[in-house]
Image (cartoon, coloured by chain):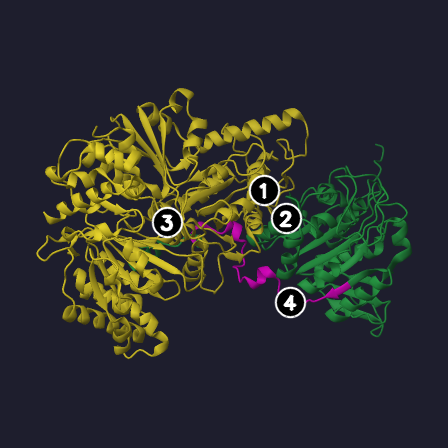
Amino acid sequence: MSTTPATPQPKTNRIGLQILDYRGGKTTLCAGCGHNAISERITEAFYEMGIQPERVMKMSGIGCSSKSPAYFMSRSFSFNSVHGRMPSVATGALLANKTMRSIGISGDGDTASIGMGQFVHLLRRNIPMIYIIEDNGVYGLTKGQFSATADIGSKLKSGVINDLPAIDTCALAIQMGATFVGRSFSGDKKQLSAMLKAAIAHRGTVMLDVISPCVTFNDHEGSTKSYKFMQGHEEPVAEVGFVSHFEDIAVEYDHDTTVDVQLHDGSHLRLRKLHEDYDPTDKVRAMNLLMEAHAKDEVLTGVFYVDTQKPDFTSMLNMVDDPLATLAPERVRPGRDVLAQIMAEHS
Amino acid sequence: MGRKNGVANVIRAALEYNNSEARRWRVSVEMVQACRPQDRPPKRLLIKACGQNLPGFTDDTYPQTWKECIQPMTTPDLVVQDQPGLQPAGGIPQIVNDFSIQIATVNGSGSQSANNVLLRSIFRMGVPVSGKNLFPSNIAGLPTWYTIRVSKDGWVARKTDIDVLIAMNAETAQQDVQSMRPGAAVIYDQSLNLDQVRKDLTYYPVPFDQLAASTGADAKIRKLVKNMVYVGVAAQLLAIDMDWVEKTVRKQFAKKVKAAELNLKAVRAGFDYAASSLTKQDPFVVAPMSATQGKIIIEGNEATAMGAMFAGVTVVTWYPITPSSSVVEDLIDYMKEYRVEPDGKASFAIVQAEDELSAVGMVLGAGWAGARSMTATSGPGISLMAEFAGLGYYAEIPGVIFDVQRTGPSTGLPTRTCQGDLTFIAGLSHGDTKHVMLLPGSVKECFEFATEAFNIAEQMQTPIFVLSDLDLGMNNWMSEPFEYPEKPINRGKVLDAKQLKELGGFARYKDVDGDAIPYRTLPGTDHPAAAYFTRGSGHNEKAQYTERPDDYENNMLRLARKFETAKTLVPKPILEGKGRETIGIIAFGSSHWAVIESRDQLQRESKLGTDYLRIRAYPFTQEIHDFVAQHERVYVVEQNRDGQMLNLLKVDLDPTQVVKLRSVRHFNGLPIDARSITTVIAEQEGAAK
């Protein structure tokens, strides 16, 4: 008998799933679109963190970015809702089942223009979910109009110059009450991966503005959201390191130069300062950094603000431990005595 | 018979005026009938004077009660005041348990408790009552009227005539008095000198401030106590049983004994004053009956809240808007009381959203994730919800939306009632969208339909709209007690992990059972094939994105079939009458109460028999088609300008049937009254010709 060649065991994560179990459908976005890289990083982050895909809800609004949940984690439950309204749908879903994890993918138009109302209230409530803005400064699906995150002076392909100030979604998120706020770049694989894994470990609203160049409508000279511009202007505030709760935590770090934040699930965020004034636990400093960077035309990236103490919205509601969605009838329909009592009160 | 002469004189006076003045009087057939034959003006003179405003006069003579005969449309003129025959005289026959009381106050003055005591005291005497609040869109200082209708026959619809006025608002007092019909009684603050306004009313001046002060209440709460004084005055004059008044006050202030005593003091001050200083001159009295035994009094919104709680609602979202806010406010109270578990944790989440867009978005998010979710709103909120309504329909997500209708368009009259959202909601959102609507007609149905709406929503996997209105939602209605829901909670077609294991997988939008309702899974279902992609864009049976013409068309056709299935789940219409008359009436919602009274009027006054079908849901079931087919003429009664129910029926009915439909519409913001219906139908039927 011939010996059969030993098939190598496929690599699995800590819950025994392969990376394939986290893959999504084939992308229909443009080749080179920053969004595809982000989908890759999300896939890896959930795989590496060993999150059961069935425990994840992928939420989105409308736009190129909002299509992308179709391109990662097909075994997760997905809801592609309406333009600018993903926050409310995501909130409702978490009210129904607070035991689920939720990741929302939005764009700069979906968030900062049509969705501004719902966005700020999501932040204010500290809804326990990851909210990612795939930020390219333009409307892709409608062929390249400016969005509200486009910088002053940036130029469209057609030559039109943007003359309105950009909304800094990170500064806004810090002010409105999000508890994990950062900015990254779709091309910065290492930083984005670490930030996404930390995001998974955090409980509360994680707001990540990820600059994600639009290769078709906003990657030209004069754009401030192009690959080239980002390569020249990205200014990390800290080197983002992440040590998961199931890894060996005994990695040494320098307490003077590194901020260590223990996250909700026991993982650690290790932020090696690259900026003197950096303190991710101080709202005012975080805001200052962002304002100063604006003045200097820098695009700050990294984790700007973390608050691990503030309770998230579903905790504040003091709901029963089980998901509301599937409570047994006897727990949700009061008995005959209750109706009789109410009737007596009205007689 | 003096009064009848009086009526004749009024008509004469009207006739002597020029035509335009005469039209200010609603000269009705009853007015003429109430006159002695020799006093009756010639028909041609009436027509000359009143033009086409005449509702079908006849030469037949049979005396009717005169009190419903004459209704000044605007201010009365002096001619009327000079009629001595209109003065109520001593020894006139009493009018027992058949009149209405109007209390005119300013909003924010705390009159609600006092009005409630009056209403419930009469109710507890066994006499049928209804209470309607006419209030402004304002916090404090604007006029408010509360009307209590006392009806031995059990009629609870709004009645246009006021028999007893309690005038507490100096600003509107003159106008209030002028709108009274002759012979009415006025209880008023003596400083207002209302008895100078008209001579044909009975006046009861009361020194309210003095009496309120006599209770020892400090100046701050004297304003509130003053209201209880009128309760005492009215109780004495109208023979309302003080035992019941006292019990009602004590029940109302059950948790505040001191307040109860102070209020009772005020009631007694009013009662004693009336007993010692006023002489009863009007005919209106309350006498005990046993017609309210076992019944309750409740507002529709509270009933809706109860229904939702017993439905097992778990996620509630809202954005405050009149007149729906009390649905959720009452629900919050009930849930805190009855849906907190022994460990102090809530089996529900109630969230005040940033707007109605968000409120309904949360409803759909929660419905998608498996919760029984709801929101309550009114017209402007419905407008905002249009986008999500389409998503809910197309992506097939359950949820319940309560619309307590108010007048539109736009802001409209926020505190007035209407049935004006019907056609809008039927197809709410762009594209080919259709929605199921439940139309409760009573507070009991507010309760029952609220409970059932959640079953239908989950069975159908679509948003269900429950349309009540301000009249039903915010006014006090008598009702049989509500029955405990016997139907078990039905969560619809949801596959769990075990079923998926047996099946190996599923297609989210596939019609497996032939009823066009597919199966769904809930997020978190622990099976690799459980997840699917929900979207408002084109999708095939497997929930995959598609732009294929056949996929789109097939899905839309299935959704249309699913809407047919809804007909088997929604409440069926209710037929009143034997079904053998030639005239049919169709109505829905709060119009019901005016319709049943109108049918009685049509029968008694014009010998017009009618059958009546009350529609309780959309889509329309076969019974509605049959009803129209079985009648020669069908009057569709509704409270909006454009005949919205009529239009929905026109779309649904066979063209040969559509011609039978006629329209009775009422849309001045006030609840519909029976007379408005009777007048139109009698006239169109050429009744008594």
Q: Residue at x 14, y 48 (%)?
A: B3
| Residue designated by label 4 | A310
Amino acid of disc 3: Asp
Residue A214 badge: none
Q: Residue furthest left?
A: B91
Q: Nearer the viewer, mark 4 or mark 1?
A: 1
Secondary structure beneath dot 4 equals loop
Secondary structure beneath dot 1 equals helix
Amino acid of disc 2: Arg
Q: Are marks 4 and 1 in contact (CB under 8 Å)?
A: no
- Which one of the lettered chains is coloured green? A
Neighbor class of circle 3 (other Cα within 10 Å; few <14, some 14-19, many 20+) is many
The quarter in which the N terminus of chain A is drawn is top right
Between the C-alphas of marks 1 and 3, the distance is 28 Å
| Residue designated by label 2 | A85
Q: Chain of mark 1?
A: B
Amino acid of disc 4: Lys
The tint of chain B in the picture is yellow
Q: Residue at x 43, y 56 (%)?
A: B326
Neighbor class of circle 1 (other Cα within 10 Å; few <14, some 14-19, many 20+) is some
| Residue designated by label 1 | B387
Between the C-alphas of marks 3 and 4, the distance is 44 Å
Secondary structure beneath dot 2 equals loop
